[in-house]
Image (tube, coloured by chain):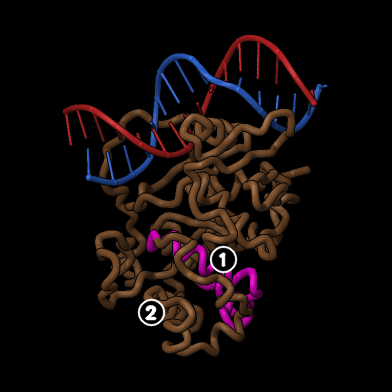
Chain colours: A brown, B red, C blue
Amino acid sequence: MSVENQLPATWTTHYSCPDVSTVTSSYTGRLWSQDLHPQNWSKYQVWEWLQQNLDMHQIDATSIPFQNFDLDGRQLCNMDYQDFTRAAGSVGPILFQSLAEVKWNVQYGQTDLFTQGDIKTEIDVEFPCSMPPFKEEPSFYSTSELFDLKSSLQPNTMLVSPAPSSPDPKRSRGRTNQVKRHNPRGTHLWEFIRDILLYPERNPGLIKWEDRSDGVFRFLKSEAVAQLWGKKKNNSSMTYEKLSRAMRYYYKREILERVDGRRLVYKFGRNARGWRESEK
DNA sequence: ACAGTATTTCCTGGTT
DNA sequence: TAACCAGGAAATACTG
């Protein structure tokens, strides 16, 4: 089975975490218009948006009650500021702002300026990560943790993607990377896996609990998960082979426990937090 | 520039 | 044979 087949449509089409330069160029339109208006999001898309916002702001997924966002796009769009605060506490304002900006961008944001380029390479690059951070003071985290997107929202500064920091003379092997974004320490692999697992109703058959209370789970679509992880890390050459190596390193740290004899099965270890139902 | 962490990449060899 | 699993070794990416 190909990876494309493994990936649910919504994920292939919508899930990604591009770097700033790609985000900006993808702000263009076509991917955004009618069918991507938040008003028309499915529950799953709402969930994706939520996840991406948490990622972007480095908010632990367990810190907000996801059940309050078991909504489709229309319901989401009907929420006002108060509703967001009620639903997500201190994270509410971030979400509110994020949604407002998505709406704005769908409506007016994209102009011809960025409609360059070949759709193919941008097609898998779009929204959640392109959520602009909100500008008001987030009292609970430092602005330095934010993406430096403030500027990227301004069309004129967006196109030039200056590959900031490192000179990086010798190139890497395999990995296709363009611009090193200021990628705040994102979610770790095991947290990424955990977060997919946490909401099975929205997990499109990628990973499944084998024993919920024991923390045993199984990959159903190993390569698809690897692709998603790769997207999150902006690494298009990620494979299950490599992802699983990283998983095996978790054994020593007791973030995972070994489950032998069962292919694609892993178990959370004593150092993995946030996966138990009681911790949700 | 540098050290440390967390992968990522590659590889050999074994198993299902 | 394909798809996994085990880990070692070394390279990378990023952070402080």
Q: Using the image, tell me which numbered label, if any, was put on residue A48.
A: 1
Mark 2 belongs to which amino acid? Pro
- Against A88, residue A193 (above or below) is above
Chain letter for mark 2, please.
Answer: A
The residue sitting at 73% across, 46% down in the picture is A220
Q: Position of residue A6 (x, y in %)?
A: 73, 50
Image x and y of residue A226, in percent? 60, 43
> Which numbered tag is attached to residue A130?
none
Local secondary structure at mark 1: helix
Residue A25 showing in the rendered view: no
Image side of residue A143 versus residue A28, left or right: left
- What amino acid type should be assigned to the residue bearing mark 1? Glu
Element at badge 2? helix
Does the image show residue A199?
yes
Q: Residues within 10 Å of mark 2 (few under 14, many from 20)?
A: some
Residue A134: x %, y % from top left? 34, 74
* Start-end of magenta stretch: A29-58
